[in-house]
């Protein structure tokens, strides 16, 4: 049995990352809204008889950003030295893998509905995202193992090794060890019996490097195998956020979370609120003093606390030192703190003119995007790297398994031959963000209408409307245009649809109705085609086609005028007068 060198190696890396972990722990306390405690000037002594207030500003801001990121849609784009059909196959393969991965997460973890939601929370709150992802074919079934990683507990050296750390209760750990024992019995690695005791959480460390995989439990090695993939099965991405210095101690500020602009201000806001509430409580329970004529040479009595009534010797009444207008100073301080927090973490839209202009709406959205653009970049990098790992896993499995496998979500699985998936080195895999901000979508739709007929359709769909499948949109639009020009196409499509519904309907009466409908449509289609092939030429129409012509409409800027303010100008204004007709 091996000694504890691997466990110690992991522990040494955790010690080196302790400044970063301290920062993460502070953020976690802030988001959990742990009770704020007002302290003395030196910060060492907790003050008594005060009202402590814990604000929710940072947590509320984080929730807004996270929910926004989690709602985004991502489109897989494969480009490079592959034919369009092959690229489409790879895209479908990757989308099916993501769908099955989300099912795996949903069935394994109670609080992880999908990977993007998990990553959205962690890229904002931790500044790092990670996942351990593997795939295999077992008895002809394609199986995925996916573990989302909390990067607070994942020591790693980029490209060399990674060791996720997690905790399990005894019964959960026993179940996991049984799986490792089963794998060893099938010839995959070595299993070592470990001793588990007590009902407390048990620490486990899953170490991976380019050569081996070791599973450790409470400083005991439980399982060892050769790395079957030849590469690390983890995807780890750091948010390009912060100031990216590389001086001594840089690790503490590498990959900052979204709160780094307001972290210290949040504590000041809690202190401000606590002081104000403490002063307010004095109105309900003010301190009182009364004088008495006793001269015994003793030191003066301490200052009374809120709600306390005490006697003091005559001539020794405590009088507060004048401090000016405390209320005004408090209000000014609060405004300064809130203004700075709004700059670093805006909670509400900027003030609009009435009605708001398109430029104002677009500017606000751009400003908000600038605050968490680094999070979007990290999500794009993470998804792209994960999908490349999926292709590499498929290529590895396809060398041994030559059959087809079904991949995807329940009810929408597709068949793929893993050996036919092209090598990932022949093309690039990127993830395109599909904007889901409702305000910006309104502006984009107005821009699209203004550009219609003046700009290429593909540019309008991809760069303005940012639809998920621009090629699919173009095909559907061309098909609808053809249907308007040739009604027989619509009749043929309806006949086919009614025929399919007739086959799928179990009710005999409804099935008979559907069958009659498709026969009627089919007859109308035949008659329309016959008339189209033998058009009737009217006098004076020689050389003209019998097909109706579809009117081509161009775009105009009217759609943007209503979004440019009441006068059609940035910034709005009053309604302008209609010019009088001259004549």
Image (cartoon, grey):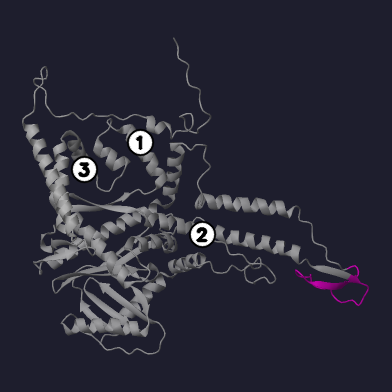
Structural crowding at the residue carrying mark 1, measured as other residues with C-alpha within 10 Å and reported as few (<14), some (14–19) or many (≥20): many
Residue 159 seen by the camera: no
Q: Whole-percent x and y of residue 224?
A: 23, 80
The quadrant of the image that shows the C terminus is top left
Residue toward you, 317 or 353: 353
Horizontal arrangement in the rendering, residue 348 relative to residue 39 (left or right): left
Residue drawn at (84%, 75%) of the image: 299
Q: Secondary structure at mark 1?
A: helix
Q: Determine the CA span between mark 2 and mark 3.
A: 45 Å
Residue 191 seen by the camera: yes
94 is higher (above) or lower (below) than 313: above
Q: Determine the CA span between mark 1 and mark 2.
A: 35 Å
Magenta stretch, residue numbers: 291-315
Q: Secondary structure at mark 3?
A: helix
Residue drawn at (34%, 32%) of the image: 450
The residue where tag 3 is placed is: 476
N-term-proximal mark, 2 vs 3: 2
Structural crowding at the residue carrying mark 3, measured as other residues with C-alpha within 10 Å and reported as few (<14), some (14–19) or many (≥20): few
The residue where tag 1 is placed is: 447
Horizontal arrangement in the rendering, residue 468 relative to residue 199 (left or right): left
The residue where tag 2 is placed is: 58
Instruction: Tell whether label 3 touches label 2 (CB within 8 Å).
Output: no
Q: Quadrant of residue 379?
A: bottom left
Structural crowding at the residue carrying mark 2, measured as other residues with C-alpha within 10 Å and reported as few (<14), some (14–19) or many (≥20): many
Q: Does the magenta-highlighted stretch encompass residue 394?
A: no
Q: Whole-percent x and y of residue 382?
A: 30, 59
Q: Quadrant of residue 463?
A: top left
Instruction: Tell whether label 3 touches label 1 (CB within 8 Å).
Output: no
């Amino acid at each position: 049995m091996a000694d504890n060198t691997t466990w110690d190696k992991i522990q040494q890396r955790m010690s080196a990352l302790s400044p970063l972990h301290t920062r993460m722990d502070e953020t976690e306390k802030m988001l959990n809204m742990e009770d704020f405690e007002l302290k003395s000037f030196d910060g060492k002594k907790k003050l008594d008889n005060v009202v402590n207030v814990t604000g929710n500003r940072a947590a509320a801001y984080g929730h807004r950003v996270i929910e926004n990121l989690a709602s985004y849609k991502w489109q897989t784009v494969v480009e490079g030295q592959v034919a369009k059909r092959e690229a489409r196959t790879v895209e479908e393969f990757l989308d099916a893998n993501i769908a099955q991965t989300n099912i795996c997460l949903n069935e394994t973890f109670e609080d992880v509905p999908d990977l993007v939601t998990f990553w959205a929370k962690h890229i904002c709150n931790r500044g790092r995202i990670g996942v351990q992802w593997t795939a295999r074919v077992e008895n002809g079934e394609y199986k995925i193992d996916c573990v989302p990683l909390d990067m607070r507990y994942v020591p790693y050296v980029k490209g060399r090794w990674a060791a996720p750390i997690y905790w399990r209760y005894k019964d959960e750990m026993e179940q996991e060890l049984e799986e490792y024992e089963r794998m060893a019995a099938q010839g995959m690695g070595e299993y070592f019996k470990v001793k588990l005791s007590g009902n407390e959480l048990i620490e486990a460390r899953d170490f991976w490097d380019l050569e081996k995989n070791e599973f450790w439990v409470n400083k005991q090695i439980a399982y060892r195998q050769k790395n079957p993939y030849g590469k690390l099965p983890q995807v780890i991405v750091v948010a390009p956020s912060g100031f990216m210095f590389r001086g001594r101690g840089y690790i503490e500020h590498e990959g900052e979370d979204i709160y780094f602009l307001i972290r210290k201000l949040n504590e000041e806001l809690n202190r401000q609120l606590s002081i104000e509430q403490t002063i307010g409580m004095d109105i309900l329970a003010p301190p009182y003093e009364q004088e008495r004529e006793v001269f015994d040479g003793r030191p003066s009595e301490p200052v009374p606390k809120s709600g306390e009534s005490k006697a003091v010797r005559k001539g020794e009444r405590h009088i507060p030192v004048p401090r000016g207008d405390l209320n005004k100073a408090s209000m000014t301080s609060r405004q300064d703190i809130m203004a700075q927090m709004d700059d670093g973490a805006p909670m509400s839209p900027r003030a609009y003119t009435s009605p708001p202009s398109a430029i104002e709406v677009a500017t606000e959205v751009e400003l908000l995007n600038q605050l968490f653009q680094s999070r979007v970049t990290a999500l794009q990098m993470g998804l792209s790297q994960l999908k490349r790992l999926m292709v590499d896993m498929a290529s590895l499995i396809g060398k041994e398994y030559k059959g087809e496998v079904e991949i995807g979500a329940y009810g929408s699985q597709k068949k793929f031959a893993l050996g036919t998936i092209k090598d990932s080195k022949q093309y690039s895999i990127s993830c395109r963000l599909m904007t889901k901000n409702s305000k910006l979508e309104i502006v984009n739709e107005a821009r699209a209408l203004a550009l219609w007929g003046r700009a290429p359709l593909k540019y309008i769909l991809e760069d303005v409307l940012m639809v998920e499948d621009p090629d699919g949109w173009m095909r559907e639009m061309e098909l609808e245009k053809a249907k308007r020009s040739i009604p027989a196409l619509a009749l043929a499509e309806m006949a086919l649809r009614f025929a399919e519904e007739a086959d799928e309907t179990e009710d005999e009466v409804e099935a008979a109705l559907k069958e009659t409908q498709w026969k009627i449509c089919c007859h109308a289609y035949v008659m329309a085609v016959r008339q189209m092939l033998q058009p009737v030429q009217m006098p004076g129409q020689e050389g003209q086609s019998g097909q109706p012509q579809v009117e081509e409409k161009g775009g105009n800027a009217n759609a943007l005028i209503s979004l440019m303010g009441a006068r059609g100008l940035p910034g709005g204004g009053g309604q302008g007068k209609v010019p009088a007709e001259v004549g």
